Amino acid sequence: MSVFIIRRLMQAILVVWIMSLLVYVGVHIVGDPVDMLINPEADQAEIARVIRDLGLDRPLHEQYWYFLKNALQGDLGNSFIFNEPALKLVVQRIPATFELALAALGLAVVIGIPLGVYAGLKPDSKISQTIMASSILGFSLPTFWVGLMLIMFFSVMMGWLPSFGRGDTETIFGVEFSFLTWDGLTHLFLPALNLSLFKLSLVIRLARAGTREVVHQEYIKFARAKGLSQNRIIFVHLMKNIMIPVVTVLGLEFGGLIAFSVVTETVFSWPGMGKLIIDALHNLDRPLVVAYLMVIVVLFVFINLVVDVLYSILDPRVRLRDLKG
Amino acid sequence: MTDTPILDVQGLETHFFTKDGVAKAIDGVNFTVRKGEIMGLVGESGSGKSVTGFSILGLVDPPGKVVGGKVLFKGEDLLQADDKRMQELRGARISMIFQDPMMTLNPVLRVDTQMIETIQAHEKVDKQTAWQRSRDALAQVGIPSPEERMRAYPHQFSGGMRQRVAIAIALLNKPDLIIADEPTTALDVTIQGQILYETQKLCRETGTAMIWVTHDLAVVAGLADSISVMYAGRVVEQGNINDVLDNPVHPYTLGLLGSVPGHNTRGQRLYQVPGMAPSLFKLPKGCAFQPRCGYATEACQQDQTVTEPVPGRAVRCCHPQVEVSS
Ligand SMILES: Nc1ncnc2c1ncn2[C@@H]1O[C@H](COP(=O)(O)OP(=O)(O)OP(=O)(O)O)[C@@H](O)[C@H]1O
Ligand SMILES: [Mg+2]
């Protein structure tokens, strides 16, 4: 197991490094921040000074080398706009985004798996067909539109739920969380639901497809021949098998959830990383954009690592293969 | 014998309603199995042996359906029993060993889990006791170091070992009837002999009745008390094992026996039943075997009734080969 983890870690480091190169170069191609940063009335000397201060006069590979050296010490440069460490700005926003993404993931699993398994067990029932039709809607409706509709209905028309911000938060270990207060929970619900919609549809489809496949396996018939109860067969024999693809895909999609939260955070004014990056892009705040992308890359890689480990726990066959390999 | 048989199957019919038409996989099957008796159920691939087993346990999945007959288990008709009753019986009073050992165990559950749950589904025993009984069952079927193997996952076993685990599971609750669907095909000859011996001993000692499904006539010859030969969803010949093997009467049984190496004189080519097993959608009128039968006549176009050309023998054929037999 530890050999397995170490090997995956090495791969992860390699991936992060390659991505840092791509991100750095990519962001430099996108646009020149100098025009945005400098007062249009400034004279030539002033402009040159600013460019020198920011290191923008050096060749790109030198700039990257400088960036990499600092990055290894945890310094991704200062934001042009806020004039504060970019990494700190991004990291400060992580908890809010994570909370939102986890809540969305939780909703997707808690709602999606029962619905998908039901639809898989009774594929011809009216309820199952309704579930499947709704999941297609979940796939195809744009997130921002659904977000606006949720706000229209639950907040504006019914006045049941707030539509703006995180609400009251509780602080543990110096990090603020909304889900710990009732007010925070009510604030969390709508954006989480909005963000989860796509994943929810995905989970329903995966769970249904898995169920359809697994119920016809011989081992399920054998479990019936052993006289096990329906519940035991569904919740142990079937569920454990369909969880393998669900966990894999969801794990991999968690990164996507964080990336996608840009839209939801904007619609619901949720103060997470997504809102930060939108503003940073607007201002061509290079260090901030790079910092955000690097954080996302590291998150993706880390999530993949966790998924691999989880997967090997769920599926004994993978564990064995990796021990041997 | 006057006591009620453990299993009495009467006129069983199981049909598959496919889009190509209705396949009469089981079309009027009768047999009885008594306490401690081992019945061999033989026939070519597709003759309906496995479906017979599933029909008895109520495990025929759509598009299949048991459409007629009676399955009397100690006098109780299982075709009328509700789900709860069937769940009580399955794995406890009647257990089944499936044909394909690679597919019968759940790949993500440990062997101990899959064994213990089988006991606890039917009996209120603590985990410790259930665990010990499971381990003993593994030892009984000849799995080395059963204690350690209990913690293994199915993929860590070979096919033969998996089949033994399945056999051990079938034995766990000391059932009255075991339906063994070609349980030893995946095993090598020594192990096969060992399992056959163990099984026979078990049936003798505990009075467990058994239906032993197989292609291999040599296996049933040494093991079974009676034999039913199936062809295209029907039992064509039935009787005491030695009588049938020494003195087969149905042309199909004759053909099957002709294809057993031991029955041929040295140097002679192995005899094959000529032709192919029929498609259930294109069965000929009357006797299903007639296109492949050397004795077929006009009379074979009629529906065949079951006769008793030799005492204690049930045969579905209008040309029983009584005098030809060796
Ligand atoms: N799911 C199904 N759908 C349609 N027909 C089926 C289905 N299962 C079985 N049958 C039909 O039932 C017949 C009997 O099948 P069965 O599995 O009992 O054969 P068998 O005697 O066990 O053969 P084998 O020795 O290959 O295991 C087959 O010929 C097949 O046409
Ligand atoms: Mg079969």
Image: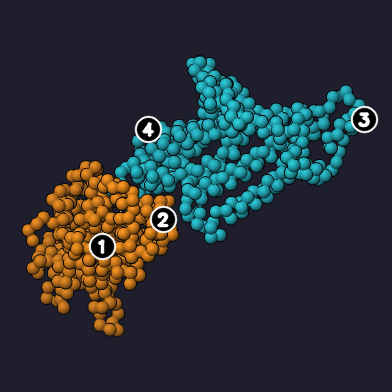
Chain colours: A cyan, B orange
Of all chains, the one bearing label 2 is B
User: The disc labelled 3 sits on which kind of residue?
Assistant: Ala
Specify which label sits upstream in the sequence, 2 or 1.
2
CB atoms of marks 2 and 1 within 8 Å: no
Q: Is residue A175 visible?
A: yes
Secondary element under disc 1, as helix, strand or loop, is strand
Label 1 sits on residue: B213
**Pointer 2 residue:** B151
Q: Give the side of residue A243 with respect to residue A277, left or right.
A: left
Please check whether the numbered discs 4 and 3 fall on a single chain: yes
The answer as to whether the residues below labels 3 and 2 share one chain is no
Q: Residue at x 7, y 58 (%)?
A: B2
Q: Which residue is mark 3?
A: A45
Badges 2 and 1, same chain = yes
**Amino acid at pointer 1:** Val
- The image quadrant where one finds the N terminus of chain B is bottom left
How far separated are the C-alphas under marks 4 and 3?
72 Å
Of tags 4 and 3, the one toward the viewer is 3
Residues at circles 4 and 2 in contact by the CB criterion of under 8 Å:
no
Neighbourhood count class around disc 3 (C-alpha, 10 Å): few under 14, some 14–19, many 20 upward: few
From the Cβ of disc 1, is ligand 2 less than 8 Å away? yes
Q: Secondary structure at mark 2?
A: loop
> Mark 2: few, some, or many residues within 10 Å (few <14, many ≥20)?
few
Q: Are the numbered discs 4 and 2 placed on the same chain, yes or no? A: no
- The chain under label 1 reads B
